Amino acid sequence: MIRDRGNIKWNAMMLPEHVKVLREWHEKDNYVEKPELDEWALQELSEQLQIACNNHTQVEIKIWEAAHIFTATGIISKLDAAKGTLYFEDGRRFPFHFIVGLTKYE
């Protein structure tokens, strides 16, 4: 059975500058730009949020944050237009400007 050390064996042959550039390159591969929603998409998202909040249905929202898109599932308890924040029943909250998608579960 071969016991390979993986990338450890190559670290001795690489300069710190090379390692730094490779790490930055790897981070750029995972970078996702924030999707720009037009006014029709924003209106549709707003209507879906209102309906989900009024009906207390479970939703899955897509959130863009720190150059990645995350999903969060829960029931909307409150939409605060003054603060621009969506609140889930379990206490999590998300700013409106980070929300890029919504899926309702009936």
Image (cartoon, rainbow, N blue to C red):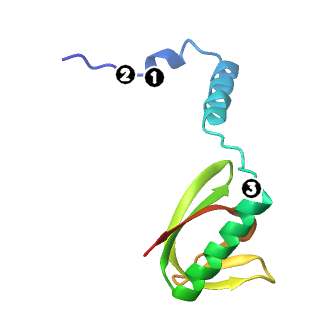
Which secondary structure lies at badge 2?
A: loop
Q: Which residue is located at x 42 percent, y 76 percent? A: 106
Relative to 57, say whether 96 is above or below.
above
- Comparing 41 with 74, the one in front is 41
Q: Quadrant of residue 46?
A: bottom right
| Residue 92 picture location, percent across and down | 58, 76
Query: Is disc 3 in contact with disc 1, using a CB cutoff of under 8 Å?
Result: no
Q: Residues within 10 Å of mark 3 (few under 14, many from 20)?
A: few
| Residue 29 picture location, percent across and down | 62, 32
Relative to 26, say whether 45 is above or below.
below
Q: Which residue is mark 3?
A: 37
- Comparing 36 with 65, the one in front is 36
Q: Which residue is located at x 53 percent, y 16 percent? A: 12
Q: Residues within 10 Å of mark 2 (few under 14, many from 20)?
A: few
Q: Which residue is located at x 63 percent, y 36 percent? A: 27
Q: Which mark is residue 5?
A: 2
User: Which of the marked residues, 3 or 2, is nearer the chain's N terminus?
Assistant: 2
Front disc: 3 or 1: 3
Q: Residues within 10 Å of mark 1 (few under 14, many from 20)?
A: few
Front disc: 3 or 2: 3
What's under tag 3, amino acid-wise? Leu
Q: Which residue is mark 1?
A: 8
Q: Is residue 72 left or right of residue 31?
A: left
User: Which of the marked residues, 3 or 1, is nearer the chain's N terminus?
Assistant: 1
Which secondary structure lies at badge 3?
A: loop
Query: Is disc 1 in contact with disc 2, using a CB cutoff of under 8 Å?
Result: yes
Report, in whole angstroms, how far the alpha carbon at label 3 lies from the one at label 2: 46 Å
Q: Which residue is located at x 68 percent, y 52 percent? A: 66
What's under tag 2, amino acid-wise? Arg
**Quarter in which the N terminus is drawn:** top left
